[in-house]
Image: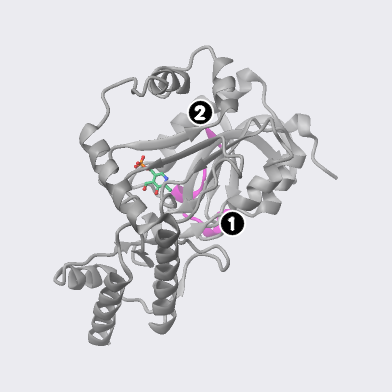
Amino acid sequence: MAPNSSRMTLSQADAQAAASACSAATGELLDDGRPRPNVVGVGAGVKWRNGEPTGEPAVVVLVTHKVAKAQLAKAEVVPAKVQNMQTDVLAVDWGQANKAEDLAEALRRSEYDAVAVVMNETSTGVRNPIEQYAEILADYPDTLFLVDVVSSYMGEKILVDEWGIDVCLTSTQKAFALPPGMALGAVSPAVLERARQVENRGYYFDVLEIDRHHQKNNTPATPPIALMYAADRQLDDILSEGLDNRFARHERMQQMTHEWVRRAGFELYSEDGYHSRTVSNVRNTRGIDVVALNNFLKDRGMMISNGYGKLKGQAFRIAHMGDTQPAHLEELFAAMDDFLAQAG
Ligand SMILES: Cc1ncc(COP(=O)(O)O)c(C=O)c1O
């Protein structure tokens, strides 16, 4: 039986109380040196009991996997209350994609203003199936579709209008291959309309203010002009390569990386069928010293990334995006093979 949808939504007062407790919980549960390595996020939401929503506000604590209290040290246990607000623990496994069926089920259960997703998780190497989300969301015209495309943008095709994306946000420092400092985005007319209904929108991220200036080919505040010149040049280079060629190059580099991972006896951390086009997260199944590997590579003018957060040492990431060419990867893999041969 579907859960009672009226118990999935909070009153305004409850939502505010949960949000305020959530801010406190972020400091308490997610600050550096925290004793709960399993906790990966916190949010404000509804408390569930026995598989059913209760309609009561809660601080929802996201963990990579649920662990029985008896197996945890006292300091590792998620407290039952934060700032007097009850907590609820929700497992979200790293490396697993958010399945379209789960989205469809959530939308059947309750009404949502918006669905916010990350297309390509730079931290885990997961590429979420946003084309499938788009198909599902086509039946929910009042639910906005907000997509972080930060590390996909310019590495694979993103059909903003066809997929009905309402907010598509990215930045310059990933597959666009420029320094950080500029956010690029597109918003749909539905977002502008929704924004008009919000009284206190703030200033910095007010899409109406940004749009008003945009109509005059301007920005609300001083933009990073040096980066805009760099972007102009980069776009010339991208167009001379040709978008289709660029995307094909990224696909080829993904395949080359997967082949090396298999050949070298490692495995991908991300779930099969959901591997990122632009970055591969490699499970350190051979137990190599990732810091030593990077020092070895640095001597040859190259660098990879250690695993993100709790994956440090347990995984490492190889970026295959932007201006990187297949020949660069060949050089990298030859150096990594040398390191492995030397490490034994
Ligand atoms: C998927 C994704 N989203 C968002 C961000 C944040 O981007 P910024 O640091 O430009 O705010 C990053 C940065 O690494 C990212 O990889």
Dot 2: what SS? helix
Q: Which residue is rendered at x = 57% and y = 29% of the image?
A: 85
Which quadrant of the figure shows ligand 1? top left
Furthest residue toward top: 199
Q: Quadrant of residue 288?
A: bottom left
Please state which of residues 323 and 171 is positioned toward the viewer in this rendering.
323
Identify which residue is drawn at 47% across, 17% down: 201
Does residue 83 appear anywhere in the picture?
no
Residue sitting at x 52%, y 45%: 78
Task: Tell me if residue 5 comes above or below residue 309 in the rendering.
Answer: above
Residue type, numbered disc 1: Ala
Location of residue 67 in the rendering, given as x and y in whole percent from the top left corner: 56, 57
Query: Residue, x 59% and y 15% (percent of image)?
Result: 197
Point out residue 140 in the picture as x, y percentages from the top left corner: 72, 36
Which quarter of the rendered picture does the N terminus lie within?
A: top right
Per the image, the residue denoted by label 2 is: 21
Which range of residues does the magenta coloring cover? Answer: 67-83
Residue 253 % position (x, y): 39, 69
Confirm whether the magenta stretch covers residue 137.
no
Provide the residue designation for mark 1.
Answer: 68
Q: Which mark is residue 89?
A: none
Q: Is mark 2 within 8 Å of ligand 1?
A: no
Q: CA distance from mark 1 to mark 2?
A: 24 Å
The quadrant of the picture occupied by the C terminus is: bottom left
Question: Is 332 in front, or is 271?
Answer: 332
Q: Is residue 17 left or right of residue 141?
A: left
Would residue 100 appear left or right of 237 to someone viewing this image?
right
